[in-house]
Every structure is written in structure tokens, then in C-alpha cells.
Image (cartoon, grey):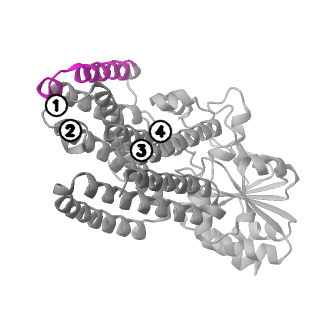
Amino acid sequence: MSMNLVVLLYLVASIFFIQALKGLSHPSTSRIGNGFGMAGMAIAVLTTVALIYKLRPEIATVGMAWVLLGLLVGGTAGTLMAKRVEMTKMPELVAFMHSMIGLAAVFIAIACVAEPWAFNIVEKGQPIPLGNKVELFIGAFVGAITFSGSVIAFGKLSGKYKFRLFQGAPVVFKGQHMLNLVLALLMVALGLVFVASSTQAEGWPAFWGMLALAFVLGVLIIIPIGGADMPVVVSMLNSYSGWAAAGIGFSLNNSMLIIAGSLVGSSGAILSYIMCKAMNRSFFNVILGGFGGEAVAAATGGGEQRPVKTGSADDAAFLLGNADTVIIVPGYGLAVARAQHPLKELTEKLIAKGVQVKYAIHPVAGRMPGHMNVLLAEAEVPYDQVFEMEDINSEFGDTDVVLVLGANDVVNPAAKDPKSPIAGMPILEAYKARQVIVNKRSMASGYAGLDNELFYMERTMMVFGDAKKVVEDMVKAIE
């Protein structure tokens, strides 16, 4: 295989990856996007295998045996995990995948430093060039931060580990940001020592020290972030994993890895920016991991019990069935109850009665970007019924009934109060509707730790209970 053909095939794979990102930008084209992504990856892998046989034929056969074994083990594990994972556990699976990408980048960096000639970086016995050392340093520390940070994010999202660092509440202590700054400076200093070293023996201690500090920094960056901010954390770590891959791609002189990593890194950064706008957060604070703790701490605290208007599933069904327009706001509670299929049935019943039904999706509803879109897609809810916040907010004022299922902070009118801890956070303006029905298990506050003023409004009716059971009862009542 000629190098010109390799470059051409890598270019084709890159175009497929770009088309994959384009397809994944909307639920209606996501399957096509996934198809492009898989095809592009197949082209990239097969081209790389052929390139290895061309450049290093003496090791290709044995090396490919190990690669195939790794593909078999990893592919089998991935397939089983994908089949078994529940929709509510998808954010944890994504965090786990990010951690594996970061760890892979670290292992490749270590291998490149140990035996650079095996990767065609230099001839055997020659020192690693300065530029390659810088690339290895960047790829290694970003990968290490991504790995340890993703492990913490996985624990926080899981919620089943008693270890304090894995708890949903922020872990904060005095001087935390200063400690992070000092460790970051030490990490960079050790990286510079590694880059400036003239021999491998001189550079190894600095390299290992830099990696150790990077692993610690990954933990310290994520632990002050509370559960409310996990959607941003997931997209941020996605971006980090892409930059780690791109950094290693420079070291290996692999244009495909550079392009793929850059696409993941840049798209993750853009998504993080969108998430930050949706939560009224500072983008730069997110990148540095210095957000979440103060806001949540300020918001936490119980208030006095206030009266609310309650009703039954039958009452809710009566209001929905007699409305002309209904907007449904799904939240994480809907995912936990796995109520998406009964909800679709409810929607079909209402549409059959002549009711216009739409779904309103907040960018950070659930525990990862697009969580609610995926949930509704699983139930085969038509895409033309699902609307993003900026497209539907103007319609709430003319809507007869809004049904809020398991959502809390994303519909809290307190965001309109300049004195509120969540002031400025864009919300779905459900409070403007003529009637609001809210289904929750209890009056517990959301991740932000605030009372939701929507629950206490005169035109709001609370229906307590498991979302799946309540929606199923609504369906029976409408029938």
C-alpha cells in the first residue's frame, strides 16, 4: 500500500467522521450518523493495519495477533455492556468509556517513551526529539486527568458507592483551588524537566512524577462538582478524551488519530459551552473544574413546609383530556421510572382525542447531554413532537396544560430571581401555562438544593407517585 493511498483513505475516514458528527446533532439522523462513524472507524483501522504490515513487516504478524485478541476481548465486553445497560445508567457508561480512552492515551505515551523506535519516532538508541517529547507530555497528562476524573464522575453518577469522593454532593475544603494551582504548576514543571532531559534515564523520574500529579489533579478537579452539574462534566471529559487522543496522534505521526481526536475534542468543547449557557455557568471555570461546589453549598438547606395543591392521576387525566394544547416536560425521574413507553401511549390517546401534544427538552435534563432525547427515541416518540428549549419556550404562555414528569430545577421559576443561587439559568417556562401538572415521588428538592416555586403556584397540581404508575393510571383514566 502506497503512502498516497494511506493518506487518501485516512481522508475518506475523516470525512465519514465529520458526517457522523453532523448526523448525531439531531435524533432523526442519529442512526445515519452512527453508521458513518462505524464505517469511518472500519476504514481507519484496516488502513492502519495495512500500514503496519508495510512499515514493520517483521513484527506485524505477532503484533496483529495481540491486536485481534484485544479487539475480541474489548469488543465482547463492550457488546455485553451495551446490551445490559439501562437507559438511566447510560451516563455512567459514557463516563467509563471516557476513562478508558484516557488510560489508553497514558499507556501509549509510556510505551512511546520506553521504546520510541518501536513507533518509528527515532532510530534505536537515538534520543526522542524535543517536539515529540512535548507531544507525549501533553497527551499523557491530559489522558491521566481524563482517566481519574472520569472514574470520579462514574462513581458520582452511579450513586451506589459509599466512598465520600463518589457521593453526589460536592467535596470541598479550604484552599482547594490553590492546591489545584500548585499541583498543576508542579506537573508542568516536571513535564518541562522531562522535555529538557537529554537521556531516557534522566527523563523517566520527571515523567512518572508528572503522570502521578495528573492522576491526582483529575480527582481534585471533579470532586467539587455536584450532581446537578454532571451533564457538563460528561461533555467536558468527552472533550478531554479527544484532546488526549490528538496529542498522542502527533507523537505517533498518525494523521487519522489527530483528526479524530480533534473532532471529538472540539465537538465536546462546543457541547460543554452549550451546557454552560444552559446552566448559566462560566465556561472557563468548567474547564478548570472550579465550579459547582459554591453554588450548591449556598443553595442547600431545608426551608419551612409550604402547602401545595395535590390531585390524583384521574384528576390529571381529566385536565389533559379536556385541553387543546399540552406540553410534556420529561426529566430524570422519568428515566428512573422507565416511564417513556407508557408516556408515548398517553400521548397517542391524547392525540386521538384531538389534543395537540409536544415535548419540551431542556439541554441539561437528565444526567448527560441528550439524555431525554435518547429516552424518548427508545420509546419511538416521533421526532416532530420533540422540541428544544429555545424553540418551544415562547409557546408555554399559550398552552392549556403542561405535564412535568420527574423534572425539577429546569422548570424552577426561581431562576428569574436575581437573588437566587440559580439566577440566570435558562429554564423551560412551564410556569406561564394556564395549568401545570407536576409528577414527583416527593417534595424533595432537585440537585440545586432549592425549593421549586412552580410547585407552590395556584395553578399547579402535584401528583405524587412513581412516574410509570401515575402515567399508566392516566392512560386508563383517559380510556
Name the N-terminal-most of marks 2 and 3. 2
Is residue 32 left or right of 103 when viewed as pictured? right
Residue 226's disc is: 4
Q: CA distance from mark 2 to mark 3?
A: 18 Å
Q: CA distance from mark 4 to mark 2?
A: 41 Å
Instruction: Locate residue 189: give its quadrant.
Output: top left
Disc number lying in front (2 or 1): 1
Q: Residues within 10 Å of mark 4 (few under 14, many from 20)?
A: many
Residue for point 60% across, 47% down: 364
Is residue 152 left or right of 398 when viewed as pictured? left
Disc number lying in front (4 or 2): 2
Give the secondary structure at mark 1: loop
Name the N-terminal-most of marks 1 and 3. 1
Q: Which residue in the protein does label 3 denote?
A: 255
Which quadrant of the figure contains the N terminus? bottom left
- What amino acid type should be assigned to the residue bearing mark 2? Pro
Name the N-terminal-most of marks 2 and 1. 2
Residue for point 46% across, 36% down: 225
Is residue 456 left or right of 91 when viewed as pictured? right
Instruction: Decide which of 373, 57 is in the foreground and name it.
Output: 57
Residue 116's disc is: 2
Image height check: is 180 above or below 169? above
Q: Would residue 449 be visible to someone looking at this image?
A: no
Q: Specify whether residue 455 is painted magenta.
A: no
Which residues lie in the magenta part?
Answer: 178-204
Image height check: is 178 above or below 95? above
Name the N-terminal-most of marks 4 and 3. 4
> Mark 1 touching mark 3, by CB under 8 A?
no
Q: Specify whether residue 198 is painted magenta.
A: yes
